[in-house]
Image (spheres, rainbow, N blue to C red):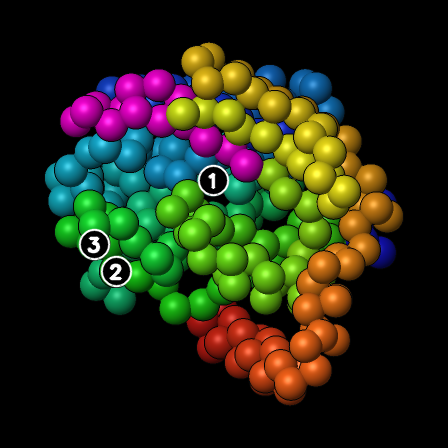
Amino acid sequence: MPAKVLQIAAAQLKFRRTLPENVELIRRLLAEAARAGSDVVLFPECALTGYSVDFHKTARGEIENGLKAVSDAARAHRCHVVIGSPTFARGHRFNSLLVFDRQGRERFRYHKIHLTQREVKFFKPGNSIAYFYIDGVPCTAIICHERRFPELVRLPVMMGAVFYVFANSVGPQGGGLWSAGDSKIVAPDSRVLALANSRDEMLIHARLNLSQAGRKYARDALRQPAFLRGHWKAMLAACRRQLVRQH
């Protein structure tokens, strides 16, 4: 049976100068979250490497070793981990989000679809929505810039995904870039359950009562306007088929 309650932590972090330093930070925050009783810990986009780096110079082996360390930490702390990292597949580099379960097994991998002008220099866009399960609970994800494309959320929510958890980096990222922080966890009725500031590295926590997640707006959109009902259903079927092909 799906969990009725999930204890969630979102990690707002300041990127370190090197990948090993970021990995050590991730391991420390994961351990802290696990001690607080978290079932799931969400980390930001490119948490493993930092965002404002030359990804052409980041070796595949170094990234895979870093992800192995995250996997080991998830298993050691018996905690689900959702984390942003570059990945490689079919000769291409992707800006990805990975999901590790309590045994440290990778359960899902999403590739960012809508890339920024900077990102297209390094990454190939993905071609499937994010839809995965944590303790039997259907979940989705988007990555940063993709907040401008609400269909990437609406479609998975129509399929069953719930709640809203946002983990961001904070402070200077290098190359004149700055990240605003303000990580948050929001309930289905729009109440802010936890909110980070725009300055500090921190973990925020919330206990999610999943019985509150009725997906009202997504269900309403499936019914009205009537002329779109068939189109929405066809799009949901296409999303499911694509998830099967890619995973």
Q: Is residue 23 visible?
A: no
- Tag 1 near tag 2, CB within 8 Å: no
Q: Is residue 53 visible?
A: yes
Q: Residue furthest top?
A: 200
Q: Residue 77: image x %, image y %?
A: 62, 29
SS category of the residue bearing label 2: loop
The span shown in magenta is: 166-179
Disc 3 marks which amino acid?
Answer: Val
Which residue lies under the disc numbered 3? 120
Q: Residue 194: image x %, image y %?
A: 66, 25
Q: Residue at x 51, y 25 (%)?
A: 182
Disc 2 marks which amino acid?
Answer: Lys
Q: Residue at x 60, y 38 (%)?
A: 165
The residue closer to the viewer here, 97 or 106, is 97
Counting residues from the N terminus, which is met first, the one under dot 3 or under dot 1? 1
Distance of label 3 from label 1 (alpha carbons): 20 Å
Q: Is 191 placed left or right of 153 in the picture?
A: right
Q: Residue 80: image x %, image y %?
A: 61, 40
Which residue lies under the disc numbered 1? 83
Distance of label 2 from label 3 (alpha carbons): 7 Å
Which residue lies under the disc numbered 2? 124
Q: Badge 2: how crowded within 10 Å, few (<14), some, or many (20+)?
A: some
User: For the residues carrying marks 2 and 3, which lies nearer the camera in this image?
Assistant: 3
Q: Residue at x 36, y 34 (%)?
A: 48
Q: Residue 12: image x %, image y %?
A: 49, 24
